Image: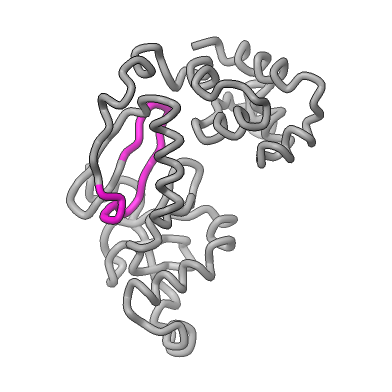
Amino acid sequence: MVLQDDFGKFLERLRGNMSLREAAKKSGLSHAYIRDLELGKNRSTNERITPSPETLKKLSSAYGYSYTDLMQKAGHLVESDISSGSRNVIELDLQNVMFIEIGRKEITYFTNDLKVIQSIASLHDFNSFLEKLDIFDFKKVDADVYVNFNQIKYYDEKAGRLYFDENGTGPFVTMSAIRQKKYQDQILRSLARNRSTSLEYTFGRGAFTGSFGVAERGTGYE
């Protein structure tokens, strides 16, 4: 792993003559965030930042640079992780997973009765993992959290919480305001489908208005 300041300078060199706005367009990241990464800190809060694996994947595509090498330089992977290949792959049915948290070096799966941790072993494994999330209808609801929309049963719109039980008393995940707005329609449709309730009933009689929910990260799993 390179020092954070050095990694920021490395990203800036990698961008080369490409403008920040062009890099933003190619990567899907904001030009301000790309610049923050190059400086190694959030300019609004002055806090140090490290790009997530997903961010590095976008930069890898935009700059045409090895994703594995970026993961190593950022400290998300070490040589032993790469050489281990698929050794630590866990066979877990994503249909039964409620939500997933992606850390710097590991992925944590939450089901009704299990909390499973898997290391991010290689470029191939991580890319395949992200592709599977799309197939199984997982949506990114926060910086490092993906929720299985086929599992949500209750939605607290005011608090931005998604729950996995119909009463809204169990584990939940809190959505960011931006993604709550983005996925509002999909949430309501998923709730109607998952609870076998019509959309007309959802909007007309308020079956899903007020509290719908999802528990705070880790609630019930500690």
Q: Residue furthest left?
A: 113
Q: Position of residue 170 (x, y in %)?
A: 26, 60
Depth check, front residue: 212 or 90: 90
Q: Position of residue 34 (x, y in %)?
A: 68, 31
Q: Position of residue 212 (x, y in %)?
A: 39, 70
Q: Position of residue 39 (x, y in %)?
A: 68, 21
How was the colour assigned to the protein in this rendering? Answer: one colour
Is 29 located above or below residue 183 in the figure?
Answer: above
Depth check, front residue: 197 or 216: 197
Residue under the point 72% across and 37% down: 24
Depth check, front residue: 128 or 145: 128
Of the 4 image quadrants, the one containing the C terminus is top left
Instruction: Determine if the magenta segment contains residue 205.
Output: no
Is 111 located above or below residue 154 in the figure?
Answer: above
Write down the region rendered in magenta.
93-108
Task: Using the rendered view, name the quadrant where residue 55 is placed.
Answer: top right
Is 192 located above or below residue 24 in the figure?
Answer: below
Residue under the point 59% across and 55% down: 178
Task: Using the rendered view, name the quadrant where residue 64 is placed.
Answer: top right
Residue under the point 35% across and 36% down: 107
Residue under the point 42% across and 87% down: 201
Q: Is residue 87 left or right of residue 28?
A: left
